[in-house]
Image (tube, rainbow, N blue to C red):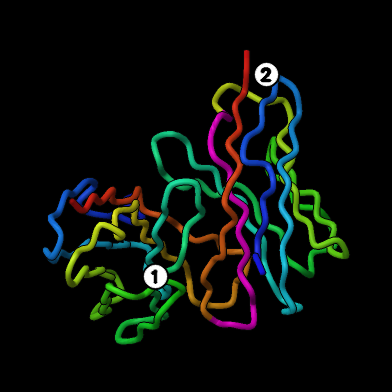
Amino acid sequence: NAGVTQTPKFQVLKTGQSMTLQCAQDMNHEYMSWYRQDPGMGLRLIHYSVGAGITDQGEVPNGYNVSRSTTEDFPLRLLSAAPSQTSVYFCASSPARDYSNQPQHFGDGTRLSIL
Amino acid sequence: AQKITQTQPGMFVQEKEAVTLDCTYDTSDPSYGLFWYKQPSSGEMIFLIYQGSYDQQNATEGRYSLNFQKARKSANLVISASQLGDSAMYFCAMREGGTGRRALTFGSGTRLQVQP
């Protein structure tokens, strides 16, 4: 019953450092996405993928890269961390078939602080 | 324009009473889905209930029901018989069917506090 697994759960970075947030799912879901949640706000879409080898930008993609080499994994890379990227990051997955009532399954989040 | 609007930043309810959390949405897509998620203080996102734009009846899941008024573009969550464990942030979200992205657009949330 792993579902969506995110690592690490917490991370502190210095401005300018790079890092990768890991996301893995074991439900064979085609669709995966990354959101960020800032205080007092709902989640905002960063990047998404509808299958291996296919990615696209969401609402707030600047400063982040993604790749999807396998169905299971969807890592999020911060290229040069900035204090504005301090946030909680959520990875989510769902089937890509048009079962529109299928909810997205979320990981437990990564709390990231940029100093 | 905001696609999902939750106008209640915070709500209080007495234990065992019912509470309604408001959500209005804006879309020109005839095919869409509306979701409610619960986020307790531990931070995870928990799916509660779904309503499709073509569904004729209001969705229900246990103590949760969705008061769907399509003409008014509202999708309010009703929690019956509130419990202390219902204290959390609640987010309304929409997925528009035409985009193919399957991404969710979230409201800013309502913090519900259940009082004993």
**Chain hosting mark 2:** B
Mark-to-mark CA distance, 2 and 1: 38 Å
Q: Which mark is residue B15?
A: 2
On the rendered structure, is B106 left or right of A13?
right
Q: Residue at x 56, y 48 (%)?
A: B37
- Tell me, for residue A3, which label it has, or none: none
Quadrant position of the N terminus of chain B in the picture: bottom right
Look at the image and give the residue range highlighted in magenta.
Answer: B86-100
Picture layout, residue A16 above or below residue B102? above
* Residue at figure coordinates x 33%, y 53% from the top left: A87
Q: Does A41 appear above or below A21?
A: above
The residue under label 1 is which amino acid type? Ile
Query: Does the magenta portion include B94?
Result: yes
Residue drawn 57% across the image and 52% down it: B108
Task: Identify the residue at image location x=22%, y=46%.
Answer: A10
- Any magenta on residue B62? no
In terms of secondary structure, what is the magenta stretch mainly? strand
Q: Are marks 2 and 1 in contact (CB under 8 Å)?
A: no
Q: Is residue A36 above or below residue B66?
A: below
